[in-house]
């Protein structure tokens, strides 16, 4: 029966070729395969496609030049349409800095971003669209302008002077890490003297970021209160900043605190999602998963790691194909029972479009490689339109936090003070949405395929075939709840790759990611195999 169908197909194709003089780009690729992508196939779990937003530079709803929460609400359709179903907001609490990683008041929304009502409205709108919203929670340190720091210094000085303390002063005298003897400051830590008072406070990031004393029961109680406050507002979890700095001297102690934090959050909302930032190699991060927190970012896959298998899988002259597969397996095994959290770049790293060798096809393929990883992927705002920016070397962080260019004539934020570059080589959002071959539309396809095929994020992986000689073919399968998909990669930048997928137990192509898509596609050959163009991926079932 199959053969008859094939013969018929060939006859029909031949006739079409005759009728239209082969003007349809049949090329070497064979029959075009129609896809049917759904946008709303979201499973109610914590495996999500997260979109990281720097509110200041995202969308300005009221024309004052500063992005705001109402702007995020206005762009929820855009975010959902791209295929994201989770949002990580970089810090939104009151803070004098532009980045807000030094918090003045943990129970507030910075007035530049909007009001508490705006945040509540954003939560409600996200939930209507089945989007989870997580907040950046920066509790290793506060701002030195936080009222708690003033209270703590005052109480600590009274205590040093052996004066009687009130109950509240007792609570605050050790709220931050103070050293009364300069010689007691560990060589690995940074501490600053308070005025000329002869005592010091720990601040490993900067003098205006004093670190909380995580041993203090009062501090731990406050952490719980902060989380309860925001979870009660309906936010779905937290991205925890700088978790290894909780106790900079001891991973064991930081992990133990994370275990408590995770329990506190889950006691309020059992489905709360916690993802921690521990900028360390796999061997360390896997220890952090022992805390029970859902996720820790996988820095070993990001541009911050020069040996990242995602970055190095481009230009396979270096014979790195097995490294991509190893990286894919390590990404899963390091997470133990938790959820892997792979990403390419964020607000602290150069954008991956900024490497000297970047071309649109490489940028697309690199994102496609990320998109085939298990777990919750994290995508930094603006990457979908290929925004460029680097904070490498002496370049400022502002370069990777520049405004989105919407191209609508409104909503663009003012340029970010301090940025030394602002580049949009692939055009505005509006222009890219109209171009079916744009980065934007490629990103969208990657994300929709993740939603459509839940096996990609959640499936158990096994190897079908890897051509270590040629460094072109990687064929894996992922199985989730009895459903199996195959993922076939052509890692070659210039060569087509023919694959007989049917002999491996699969019957149809359900998705294709072709980087050079102007005249190339993954097509069915007359013999039933498929031909993959350079830097492309086929998903088969
Ligand atoms: Ca505004
Ligand atoms: Ca600390």
Image: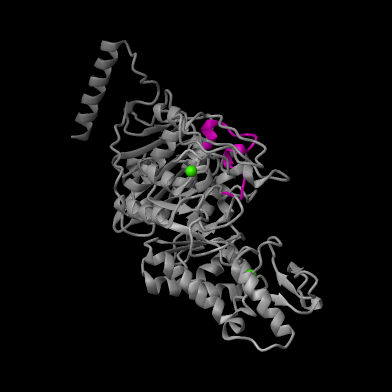
Comparing 166 with 251, the one in front is 166
> Where's residue 372, x and y in %?
44, 47
Colouring method of the image = one colour
Comparing 68 with 299, the one in front is 68
Asked which quadrant contains residue 209, the reply is: bottom right
Asked which quadrant contains residue 441, the reply is: top left
> Where's residue 138, x and y in %?
56, 63
Q: Is residue 509 left or right of residue 358?
A: left
Question: Disc count in the image?
Answer: 0
Q: Residue at x 51, y 55 (%)?
A: 110
> Where's residue 339, x and y in %?
44, 61
Magenta stretch holds residue 306? no
> Where's residue 467, x and y in %?
50, 43
**Can the viewer see residue 320?**
no
The relative height of residue 152 versus residue 122 in the rendered view (above or below) is below
**Can the viewer see residue 286?**
yes
The relative height of residue 167 versus residue 83 in the rendered view (above or below) is below
Asked which quadrant contains residue 356, the reply is: top right
Q: Residue at x 52, y 29 (%)?
A: 426
Q: Is residue 176 left or right of residue 394?
A: left
The relative height of residue 22 versus residue 116 in the rendered view (above or below) is above
Comparing 373 with 472, the one in front is 373
Q: Residue at x 32, y 52 (%)?
A: 130
Answer with the quadrant where ligand 2 appears in the image. bottom right
Q: Is residue 442 left or right of residue 319?
A: left
Quarter of the image where the C terminus is located: top left
Q: Which residues are magenta?
A: 347-363
Q: Residue at x 26, y 16 (%)?
A: 16
Quarter of the image where the N terminus is located: top left
Comparing 516 with 52, the one in front is 52
Q: Is residue 239 left or right of residue 48?
A: right
């Amino acid at each position: 029966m199959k053969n008859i169908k094939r013969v018929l197909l060939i006859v029909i194709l031949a006739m079409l070729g005759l009728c239209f003089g082969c003007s349809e780009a049949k090329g070497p690729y064979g029959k075009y395969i129609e896809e049917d992508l759904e946008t709303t196939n979201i499973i109610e779990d914590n495996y999500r496609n997260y979109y990281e937003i720097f509110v200041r530079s995202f969308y300005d709803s009221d024309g004052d030049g500063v992005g705001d929460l109402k702007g995020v609400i206005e762009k929820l359709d855009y975010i959902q349409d791209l295929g994201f179903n989770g949002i990580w907001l970089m810090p939104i609490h009151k803070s004098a800095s532009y980045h807000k990683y030094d918090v003045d008041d943990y129970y507030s929304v910075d007035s530049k971003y909007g009001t508490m009502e705006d945040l509540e409205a954003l939560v409600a709108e996200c939930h209507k669209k089945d989007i989870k919203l997580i907040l950046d929670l920066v509790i290793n340190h506060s701002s030195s302008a936080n009222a708690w720091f003033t209270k703590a210094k005052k109480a600590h000085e009274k205590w040093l002077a052996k004066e009687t303390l009130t109950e509240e002063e007792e609570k605050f005298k050790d709220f931050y890490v103070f050293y009364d003897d300069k010689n007691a400051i560990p060589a690995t830590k940074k501490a600053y003297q308070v005025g000329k008072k002869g005592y010091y406070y720990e601040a490993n990031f900067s003098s205006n970021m004093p670190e909380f004393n995580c041993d203090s029961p009062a501090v731990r109680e406050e952490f719980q209160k902060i989380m309860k406050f925001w979870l009660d507002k309906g936010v779905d979890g937290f991205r925890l900043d700088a978790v290894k700095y909780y106790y900079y001297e001891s991973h064991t102690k930081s992990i133990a605190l994370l275990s408590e934090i995770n329990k506190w959050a889950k006691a309020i909302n059992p489905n709360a999602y916690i993802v921690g930032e521990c900028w360390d190699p796999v061997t360390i991060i896997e220890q952090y998963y022992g805390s029970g927190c859902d996720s820790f970012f996988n820095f070993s896959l990001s541009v911050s790691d020069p040996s990242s298998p995602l970055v190095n899988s481009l230009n396979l002259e270096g014979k790195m194909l097995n490294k991509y597969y190893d990286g894919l397996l390590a990404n899963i095994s390091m997470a133990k029972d938790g959820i892997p959290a792979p990403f390419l770049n964020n607000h602290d790293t150069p954008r991956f479009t900024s490497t000297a060798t970047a071309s649109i096809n490489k940028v697309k393929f690199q994102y496609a490689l990320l998109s085939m990883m298990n777990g919750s992927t994290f995508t930094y705002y603006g990457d979908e339109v290929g925004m460029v920016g680097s904070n490498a070397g002496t370049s400022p962080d502002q370069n990777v936090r520049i405004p989105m260019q919407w191209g609508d004539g409104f909503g663009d934020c003012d340029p970010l003070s301090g940025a030394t570059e602002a580049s949009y080589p692939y055009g505005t959002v509006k222009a890219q949405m109209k171009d079916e071959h744009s980065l934007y539309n490629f990103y969208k396809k990657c994300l929709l395929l993740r939603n459509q095929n839940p096996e990609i994020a959640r499936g158990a992986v096994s190897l079908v075939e890897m051509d270590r000689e040629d460094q072109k073919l990687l064929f894996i399968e992922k199985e989730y709840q009895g459903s199996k998909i195959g993922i076939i990669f052509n890692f070659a930048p210039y060569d087509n790759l023919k694959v007989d997928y049917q002999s491996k137990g699969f019957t149809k192509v359900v998705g294709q990611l072709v980087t050079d898509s102007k005249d190339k596609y993954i097509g069915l050959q007359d013999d039933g195999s498929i031909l993959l163009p350079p830097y492309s991926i086929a998903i088969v079932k």
